[in-house]
Image: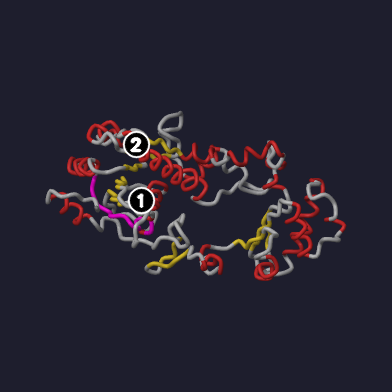
Amino acid sequence: MQKVLQGLRVLEIGGLGPGPFCAMHLADLGADVISLVRPSSGTPITGDLLNRGKRSVFTDLKTPEGRALALQLVRDTDVLIEGMRPGSMERLGLGPQECHAIHPALVYGRMTGWGQHGPLAHTAGHDANYAALSGAMWGCSPADARPVPPFGVLGDIGGGALYLMTGVLSGVLQARATGQGCVVDAAIVDGAAHMLNLMLSMRATGLVGETRDTSLHTTAPFYDTYVCADGEHITIGPIEAQFYQLLLHTLGLQDDPEFTGDQWERSAWPRRRARLAALFLQHPQAHWQALLEGSDACFAAVLSPQAAAQHPHLQARSVYAHDGGTLQASPAPRFGSAPYPINPSGPAGAHTAQVLQALASGGSAWQS
């Protein structure tokens, strides 16, 4: 099967989190990805899933042999992805200047939390820290609760890996048109803040306020999550009047005095939330799914990945799959009606001999 990124060559300097995810995503869509990773005797934070579709090679970039291997691969690659602290690749002799000297059209993708410059650029951090400082975590809870971001999704992936991917693919388009590569500075704080523009655009309408207790997504009873009788949760979000009225009719609340007033009467929101909370607590999640799912009431059950994989809609779209006993999401987006097949995952270093032999014989390590 011909994939959209077939023929794109990507060299990944193995790391943690968003960089490896971005490289996996590129491999999902057809890119030939070689990942250089340092052998480690410790337990890795992530499993082999992020290796899917890649060829993984053990090497130590701090050695002359490791540096030479990396530069040999750079000569014929389109994209390099690295996720080290600013200055680390330069100290290894593998910074943009060295790489562009031998391959001017290279797109050099740099993935960090804080960015390549700024007061915090050289300090350690993780997903939650970047999401917090960017402003993205601000609305991740009800107004009266502590903000809790979705683990790894808001910062590492949403603000990080996907912005890195946008950057390197944009750079490839430029390089193919001009023959000139570029350096992509993909910082999670930048991407996570950029994602807020949708929310910030809602300030003019009053849907988002200056404080958490004046924003729709943290205070409105019709845009919230509720606990069910079995301890599971559901979500509702009928912002539009016609969808809100449909929800009330389906729940039998259309003539309830508490709900006959204006949907946007904020003074009534606490009382309405209490009523809805008591109502949803009367039945288990499956009851509300049977009643509301598939309607325009803007409803969905809150599911674990394991439960989501069993949902008829996600099954119809083949969103999840099991490969070697590991639950994983299929490649996205799709080009046509079905997702691309899932590439096999392998352990770190599994392709070391294959790649080194190809280079030693005078050939190319890259797939045609």
SS for dot 1: loop
Q: Identify residue type, mark 1.
A: Leu
Determine if residue 62 is in view.
no
- Depth check, mark 2 against mark 1: the one in front is 2
- The answer to the question of whether label 2 and label 1 lie on touching residues, with beta carbons closer than 8 A, is no
- Single out the residue that lies furthest toward the right: 257
> Which residue is painted at 66% across and 60% down in the image?
299
Q: For the residues marked 2 and 1, what is the alpha-carbon distance in whole angstroms? A: 17 Å
* Residue 5 disc label: 1
Q: Quadrant of residue 321?
A: bottom left
Indicate the position of residue 60 as horizontal and vertical percent values. 23, 46
Q: Is residue 96 above or below residue 326?
A: above
Q: Is 52 one of the magenta-colored residues? A: yes
Nearer to me, 226 or 29: 29
Indicate the position of residue 79 as horizontal and vertical percent values. 32, 42
Q: Disc 2 designates what residue?
A: 177
Q: Identify residue type, mark 2.
A: Ala
Q: Which residues are magenta?
A: 49-60
